[in-house]
Amino acid sequence: MKLYSTNNINNIVELKEAVFKGLPEDNGLYMPVNIPVLPDAFINNLNSFSFSEIAFEITKNLFKGYISEEDITSIIENSITFPAPIVSLSKDTHILELFHGPSLAFKDFGARFMAQLMSHFNKEETKELVILVATSGDTGGAVAAGFYKTPGIKVIILYPSGKVSPLQEKQLTTLGHNISALEVDGTFDDCQALVKKAFLDQELRSQIRISSANSINISRLIPQSFYYFEAFKQLENKENVSFVIPSGNFGNLTAGLFAHKMGLPVHQFIAATNLNNIVPSYLNSGEYNPKPSVRTISNAMDVGNPSNFARMKDIFSQALTDDGFTWNNMKTMIKGFSFDDAQTKEAVKEVYETYNYTIDPHGAIGYLAFKEYKKSNPNANGVILETAHPSKFLADMESILNKKIDIPERLAKLSNETKIANFINTEYDPFKKLLLDKYC
Ligand SMILES: *Cc1c(COP(=O)(O)O)cnc(C)c1O
């Protein structure tokens, strides 16, 4: 599998390099040179494939000639280990539950697949690999769980101090072994900036083999396309299917676009955001204006400059066309809506009272977006991605619904564990020094 950089289509690398590098030197993002259209025999017969068979078929088509079918089977068996069930609220409003993995968020799919793929390629290497990951909450927990005790790989998680929930923090800071945490006195964007800077620092990279685990890594996106097929399979009515994606860095939505390119008959994508509405406003105006992120109760989507926007633009552009063309293409396929915290809380209540379903604040924004979209598209058949389990946002959920929320056992037991983290500020040089002191 070959990939190019969104900043230079002639900058082509092999999968292994893209997976370990994360980000090309020219600061673009890797995109597959060829996204294969899957055979009709597969797409029209999804019902006869299990979830892991769907994952296998997609991966096989992408990695053909690069990774043996036997190794692909092992990668899938060790990463796609939990289901992605649809719960229907009504005949045209469905919830895709993506929180059945170890960290209770959809990011488990990407993190586990990436860990398996890196571990596959790492067998050929002698030098230790250090994974740097900035998290606004959920990425870190998923990556930590995904890489825990993977031989030859260390993980360093950067998270914004005070801006992740107490249980999320426990997920990042209590595993130990090959996982360590840096608590940054700043925002998620500051964390992401530190990581990006480290990647562009040739001097650092000559001394430490580093890689990324953010949604910018292509190996995170590939498995996120699996569950679009898995969801589609479960729908009785396969007409007019809209996927509604609560979005921050837009990795999940980009993975949906990949699934569409592979031939999944999606009618519409709906980008749902909180007040960090950079993409919905681009879809409305044609102008892309990144801003500092603002804090909301759907904190995993508090992103002011979505990193996967470059990939989205790439998907909808063609060589030698202007930006207006890209915009037109994108706004046809993707509708965008954004909502504030008050609306989010109302939606959590409404879903509970109307359907007796407990939806988390991120999923609630998806619910609102679909409701809004449906006003002008009454035939829409929506699949709302429920990106995390409500218990991950315990305090907010309990105060909104005024009832106790059940915490799954795998999360509950973390509250007794001790947090271990290094506190750092947002300056690059001390961060770099710490990396060199600790990992060189
Ligand atoms: C990461 C995350 C999102 C945003 O996903 P992106 O792929 O960055 O757009 C939404 N909801 C939850 C719960 C998340 O953890």
Image: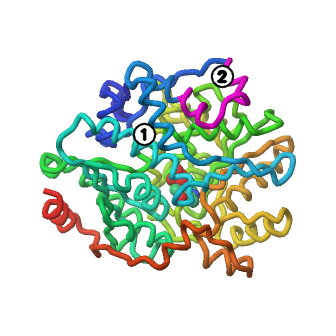
What's the mark number on residue 333?
none
Instruction: Tell me which numbered mark, 1 or 2, is placed earlier along the sequence.
Output: 2
Q: Residues within 10 Å of mark 2 (few under 14, many from 20)?
A: some
- Quadrant position of residue 160: bottom left
Asked which secondary structure carries label 2, the reply is helix
Q: CA distance from mark 1 to mark 2?
A: 22 Å
State the image coordinates of residue 394 (x, y, percent, origin top left): 61, 75
State the image coordinates of residue 257 (x, y, percent, origin top left): 58, 36
The one nearer the camera, 416 or 93, is 416
User: Residue sitting at 42 percent across and 60 percent down?
Assistant: 140
Secondary structure mainly formed by the magenta segment = helix
Inspect the magenta stretch and tell me whether residue 56 lies in it.
yes
Identify the amino acid type marked 2.
Phe
- Quadrant position of residue 99: bottom right
Residue corresponding to mark 1: 219
The one nearer the camera, 258 or 208, is 208
Q: Which of the four quarters of the rendered structure image does ligand 1 lie in? A: bottom right
The segment highlighted magenta reads 41-58
Quadrant that contains the N terminus:
top left
